[in-house]
Image: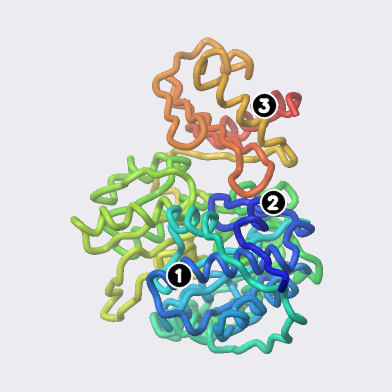
């Protein structure tokens, strides 16, 4: 009898799980058969709604990504689907091209998590998969034969070209004339695209620190080393801005002319204002200045993760024409087609790093980025995380804290202040009577415990993050 593999069995036993965005796990767990199982399950779910004959595929610069892509492609070929491979590419570029061509796609990426981990992100022909799609993929009971020899994949440049054209056609060629912009390239999947794109707008571009080794940049928890680099580069090269992204190019990291990295939600706020967005969907972890600034007709708060932001777009679209969302990590999601100075910009409901950069620079014009930031309400967020923090310990801490939040505060050394509000939308978010906010949640992508603190000063927010995490780290 012929040997047969089963997608549901391999996925349930494989050690790979869905996080806030895509399936994530250790590289050692992404065996070829597991990659194939996810691919077969995804195909079976997509074929319930779409006639799937081709499927797009791309990767980030992790050393494990090429072999994973080969396994996914082999699974596609087994069921008569032609894989269209775009090589190393930013996730939003793959998503944009696949949506334009009305085909599903798979991005092999672990985003910002360490290189010993990786992941698979799945897109329907009309955008990111939903949480319901995730459950359908996990429940799919698909049999398939053992994989043959993995195919050699030849990459096509079309997706990169389409993504760059999306933005090069939107602004004039002198948009950035006179600007000096640094690009921190490291191992970003989009590093070959950004410098030519910005030079096409007239900017003088200085490329910085390209790395042959994978660098796990987390735009929500920028390390002290990256902070020092930005300050140094800004002074050394006289830069107007510094641009970088996470590993797969869907989360931006932007510094002002002083070398200060902007929080992702502040970047998103300014981008949304420049786009004249009416209604926003943002995760509950975003800075409260998005609401208090009064620049948007509606701000809906969601759980953390792009699928929740995207799900809210359907409700917003019932009442508003120009809708968007962003996350504290900076990823900007355009939820509707919009007109921008007479030019059409198609919706791209997935995290994107390039649009917020360009809109920020266009918004600043001949002025400075720091001036735009100064115009916002004086609320500051700091965040960091404890790496290699067992998920079960995180859950235990939060479970106890939800039943006794005052006890948690005492344990953390936060005393002589009352609790004004407790929000359990995603993790535990406590608003104190003095205006400070402390938010704890386990990462959905890695064994990490994250802490966000919002306050009226940078120093207060940063110090509180450090003190909270120092206490919790002793419980590892």
Q: Which mark is residue 13?
A: 2
Identify the residue at image location x=30%, y=79%.
Answer: 344
Identify the residue at image location x=72%, y=70%.
Answer: 3
Secondary element at image label 2: helix
Residue 60 appearing in the image? yes
Q: Position of residue 319 (x, y in %)?
A: 18, 56
Q: Quadrant of the N terminus?
A: bottom right
Identify the residue at image location x=57%, y=71%.
Answer: 106
Q: Residue furthest top?
A: 416
Q: Quadrant of the C terminus?
A: top right
Q: How many marks?
A: 3
Q: Horizontally, is 129 left or right of 460 in the view?
A: left
Q: Position of residue 347 (x, y in %)?
A: 36, 70
Marks 1 and 3 close (CB-CB < 8 Å): no
Q: Quadrant of residue 207?
A: bottom right
Q: CA distance from mark 2 to mark 3?
A: 38 Å
Point out the frontmost of discs 1 and 3: 1
Q: CA distance from mark 1 to mark 2?
A: 23 Å
Q: Horizontally, is 78 left or right of 336 in the view?
A: right
Q: How is the image coloured?
A: rainbow
Q: Quadrant of residue 458?
A: top right
Q: Which mark is residue 46?
A: 1
Q: CA distance from mark 1 to mark 3?
A: 47 Å
Q: Residue furthest left?
A: 319
Label 3: which residue? 467
């Amino acid at each position: 009898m012929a040997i047969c593999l089963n997608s549901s069995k391999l996925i349930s036993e494989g050690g790979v799980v869905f996080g806030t965005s895509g399936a994530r796990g250790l590289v050692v767990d992404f065996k070829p058969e597991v990659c194939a199982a996810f691919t077969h399950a995804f195909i079976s779910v997509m074929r319930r709604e779409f006639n799937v004959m081709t499927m797009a595929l791309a990767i980030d610069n992790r050393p494990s990504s090429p072999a994973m892509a080969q396994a996914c492609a082999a699974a596609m070929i087994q069921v008569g689907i032609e894989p269209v491979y775009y090589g190393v590419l930013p996730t939003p570029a793959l998503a944009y091209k696949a949506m334009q061509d009305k085909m599903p796609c798979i991005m092999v990426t672990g985003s910002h998590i360490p290189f010993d981990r990786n992941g698979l992100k799945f897109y329907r022909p009309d955008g990111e998969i939903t949480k319901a799609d995730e459950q359908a993929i996990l429940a799919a009971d698909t049999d398939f034969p053992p994989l043959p020899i993995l195919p050699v994949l030849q990459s096509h440049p079309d997706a990169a070209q389409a993504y760059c054209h999306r933005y090069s056609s939107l602004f004039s060629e002198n948009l950035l004339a006179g600007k000096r912009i640094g690009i921190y390239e490291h191992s970003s999947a989009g590093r070959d695209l950004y410098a030519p794109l910005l030079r096409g707008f007239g900017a003088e571009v200085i490329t910085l620190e390209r790395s042959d080794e994978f660098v796990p940049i987390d735009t929500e928890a920028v390390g002290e080393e990256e902070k020092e680099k930005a300050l140094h580069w800004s002074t050394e090269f006289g830069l107007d801005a510094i641009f970088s992204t996470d590993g797969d190019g869907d989360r931006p990291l932007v510094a002002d002319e002083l070398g200060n990295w902007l929080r992702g939600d502040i970047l998103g706020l300014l981008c949304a204002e420049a786009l004249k967005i009416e209604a926003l969907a943002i995760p509950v972890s975003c800075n409260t200045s998005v609401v208090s600034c009064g620049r948007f007709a509606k701000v809906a708060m969601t759980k953390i993760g792009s699928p929740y932001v995207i799900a809210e777009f359907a409700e917003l679209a019932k009442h508003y024409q120009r809708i968007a969302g962003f996350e504290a990590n900076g990823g900007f999601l355009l939820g509707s087609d919009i007109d921008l100075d007479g030019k059409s910009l198609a919706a791209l409901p997935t995290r994107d790093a390039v649009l917020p950069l360009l809109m920020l620079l266009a918004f600043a014009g001949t002025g400075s980025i720091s001036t735009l930031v100064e115009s916002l309400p004086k609320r500051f967020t700091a965040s960091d995380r404890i790496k290699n923090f067992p998920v079960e310990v995180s859950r235990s801490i939060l479970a106890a804290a939800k039943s006794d939040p005052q006890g948690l505060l005492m344990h953390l050394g936060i005393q002589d202040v009352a609790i004004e509000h407790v929000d359990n939308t995603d993790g535990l978010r406590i608003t104190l009577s003095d205006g400070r906010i402390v938010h704890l949640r386990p990462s959905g992508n890695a064994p990490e415990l994250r802490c966000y603190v919002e306050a009226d000063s940078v120093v207060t927010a940063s110090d509180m993050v450090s003190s909270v995490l120092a206490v919790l780290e002793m419980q590892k």
